[in-house]
Image (cartoon, rainbow, N blue to C red):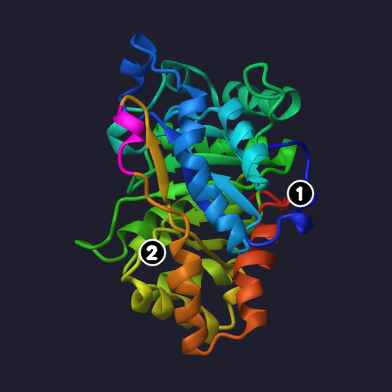
């Protein structure tokens, strides 16, 4: 966020968090904008960021999608104030019933969407000079819809032109029907691979919502990144079980762990209820160590894997 950074310098990284967000339908956002008071947001959010900086965190990926309140200037301000490296996104969010889809996503071709996103990579976002560090999509189709397929093709084009990793919020959740989340995820991966993108350029976001752990193993063995990113205090046993399954399968080097926390919400007094970023450090990491994970394995999860996942590097394969 403060300019290009070598992925090897990211240090301990929270790979899926949120700072400022506007969760109103996008049509309402366009009709009645609620631009943030940057000073007010910084006053509320900065102490949470300073807390994780003291706990050893060095980087944070703000996964707030383009139409959910992405605000590069605010992220830059928070990055500078907290002394944390931060990444922001390009892309499109089609999940949540479609209420965050702007008209241009429906109207433009995959080539035009890719040109739009590649333009943000080349020239910066909205005149700020801030360039995205990843492509963020929201996909929930089972099977994939035509619009979702178009957006995934646009993401493939963008990756092959920029080297940005493709992180996909994935649904539907599988607590009612095990395997549904995985079907959506693996359909994405199949399309991207057919478009010439290697699996290592794809992150299965919210993989913890797939109850069939065998599917996590399958996606990782194909080379994808499996992201367990909704951790909250009290979920230690569930996260240890997911991480340990990948460890036993010798796939710890394909796992990302984060919290989906933060969420200063536009229009709410002082942003509403802020979910702190510290619990990974104060509750999950101690639990993982008690379970027997060594420091090298902790480094793999929180330092080495994020550096490899978010490295800007074209990862192509022969299209089928």
Residue 205 at x, y percent in the picture: 46, 54
Q: CA distance from mark 1 to mark 2?
A: 26 Å
The reply to whether residue 65 is visible in this rendering is: no
Residue 271 on the magenta segment:
yes
**Which residue position is annotated with label 2?**
208
Q: What residue sits 63% from the left and 43% below the top? A: 86
Residue 172 at x, y percent in the picture: 30, 51
The reply to whether residue 40 is visible in this rendering is: yes
Please give the label number shown on residue 313.
1
Q: Quadrant of residue 242?
A: bottom left
From the viewer's side, name the closer residue of 201 and 262: 262
Q: Which residues are magenta?
A: 268-273
Q: Secondary structure at mark 1?
A: loop
Residue at the left extreme, as displayed:
176
Q: Looking at the image, is 30 positioned above or below residue 14?
A: above
Q: What residue sits 39% from the left and 63% below the top? A: 231
Q: Looking at the image, is 272 positioned above or below residue 16?
A: above
From the viewer's side, name the closer residue of 277 and 199: 277
Residue 152 on the magenta segment:
no
């Amino acid at each position: 966020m403060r300019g290009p950074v070598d992925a090897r310098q990211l240090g301990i990284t929270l790979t899926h968090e949120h700072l400022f967000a506007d969760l109103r339908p996008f049509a309402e956002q366009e009709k009645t904008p609620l631009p943030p008071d940057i000073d007010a947001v910084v006053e509320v959010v900065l102490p949470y960021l300073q807390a994780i900086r003291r706990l050893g965190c060095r980087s944070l990926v703000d996964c707030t999608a383009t139409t959910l309140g992405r605000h590069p200037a605010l992220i830059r301000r928070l990055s500078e104030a907290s002394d944390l490296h931060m990444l922001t996104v390009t892309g499109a969010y089609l999940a949540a019933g479609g209420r965050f889809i702007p008209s241009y996503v429906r109207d433009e071709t995959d080539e035009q969407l890719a040109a739009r996103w590649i333009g943000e990579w080349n020239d910066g976002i909205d005149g700020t000079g801030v360039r995205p560090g990843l492509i963020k999509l929201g996909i929930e189709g089972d099977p994939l819809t035509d619009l979702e397929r178009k957006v995934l093709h646009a993401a493939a084009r963008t990756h092959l032109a920029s080297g940005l990793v493709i992180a996909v919020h994935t649904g539907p959740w599988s607590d009612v029907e095990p395997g549904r989340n995985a079907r959506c995820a693996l359909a994405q991966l199949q399309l991207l691979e057919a478009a010439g993108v290697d699996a290592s350029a794809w992150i299965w976001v919210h993989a913890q919502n797939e109850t069939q752990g065998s599917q996590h193993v399958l996606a990782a063995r194909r080379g994808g990144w499996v992201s367990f990113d909704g951790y909250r205090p009290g979920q230690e046993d569930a996260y240890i079980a997911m991480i340990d399954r990948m460890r036993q399968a010798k796939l710890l080097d394909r796992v990302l762990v984060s919290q989906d926390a933060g969420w200063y919400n536009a229009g709410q007094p002082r942003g509403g209820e802020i979910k702190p970023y510290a619990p990974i450090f104060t509750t999950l990491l101690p639990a993982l160590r008690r379970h027997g994970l060594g420091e090298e394995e902790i480094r793999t999860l929180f330092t080495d894997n994020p550096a490899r996942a978010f490295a800007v590097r074209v990862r192509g394969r022969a299209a089928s």
